[in-house]
Amino acid sequence: MGDPKFPRRSFDTPSHPWQGERIKEEALLVKQYGLKSKKELWKAKTILRNLRKQSRDLQARLRTGEHQAKMETENLLHKCARIGLLPMEGTRLDDVLGLSDIALLERRLQTVVYNKGLASTVGQARQFIVHGHVCIDDQKVTIPGYIVTREDEERIVLNPRSPIADELHPLKQAQKEAAAMRARHEEAAEMKKDLGKKKFVKHVPKDVEAAVQDVEDVPAELPTEEVN
């Protein structure tokens, strides 16, 4: 059981401490999602690893026709759908095996608050949550790594008792400016993508045009020479 003062670690560390590609990938994810440390990323990886392990075990048990495995399969798929990892219908155990780390990181409360526009950056979203400025309905949530369900996603708002909820607060104006800038960046990225798809015709030099014209003036079939 262990000492209650020293709970067991809730995540698994990498098997090898020095792997350049993994370290770079983890550093990018930590920066992109505003994580405090790599421990939070390892916790997300551990949760997905447990889901994949459960999916593989259920697939093996389903081959034997076990009735209990069918019930556990429905519960697993319903759980993944409820927290937004999979669609509500038409999913299989193979879909659980294909889940990525980003899928779970997108369901963290910190990321959802930022995507809803309640904060200008992911770092500010974490600060709002830790300081008690975010709540789900009337329940204050101060855990940035809280996994948001589909039902809770629509009920995430700023705490009405928080001064940040006031429309005259300076942060409100800063959030509007940040949202407008983010929209402009996204629009510019879309325009750049569209321009990249178009084909531009380079300027053809005059000597090349003349050579092509001379070739076009030559008849397709040359007259045959009569042999005496």
Image (cartoon, grey):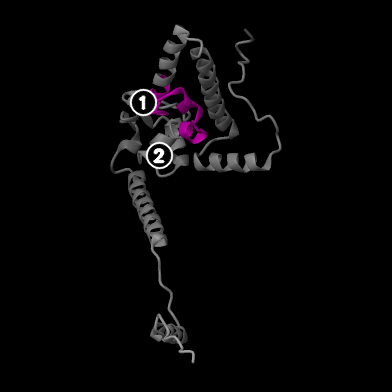
Q: Is residue 136 something that shows in the picture?
A: no
Q: State the SS at label 2.
A: helix
Residue 91 on the magenta span: yes
Task: In the rendered structure, find residue 193 and report the number of the disc placed on it.
Answer: none
- The correct choice, above or below, for 120 with respect to 86 in the image is below
Residue 194: quadrant of the picture = bottom left
Task: In the rendered structure, find residue 90 and report the number of the disc placed on it.
Answer: 1
Q: Nearer the viewer, mark 2 or mark 1?
A: 1
- The correct choice, above or below, for 66 with respect to 134 in the image is above
Instruction: Return the x and y of residue 6 as percentages of the image width and height.
Output: 63, 15
Residue type at mark 2: give it: Tyr
* Residue for point 56% across, 43% down: 28
Q: Which residues are magenta?
A: 79-105
Q: Is residue 65 something that shows in the picture?
A: yes
Instruction: Return the x and y of residue 128 as percentages of the image width and height.
Output: 42, 35
* Residue for point 39% across, 86% down: 217
Instruction: Return the x and y of residue 80 as percentages of the image width and height.
Output: 42, 23
Foreground residue among 119 and 95: 95
Task: In the rendered structure, find residue 114 and report the number of the disc placed on it.
Answer: 2
* Quadrant of image for the N terminus: top right
Residue type at mark 1: give it: Gly
Task: Answer with left or right where residue 169 lies relative to residue 6.
Answer: left
* Residue for point 50% across, 14% down: 63
Residue 63 on the magenta span: no
* Residue for point 71% across, 38% down: 18
Task: Answer with left or right where residue 3 lies relative to residue 93.
Answer: right
Q: State the SS at label 1.
A: loop
Instruction: Return the x and y of residue 27 as percentages of the image width and height.
Output: 59, 41
Crowding near the residue tagged with mark 2, few <14, some 14–19, many ≥20 C-alpha atoms within 10 Å: some
Foreground residue among 78 and 145: 78
Mark 2–mark 1 Cα distance, whole angstroms, equals 29 Å
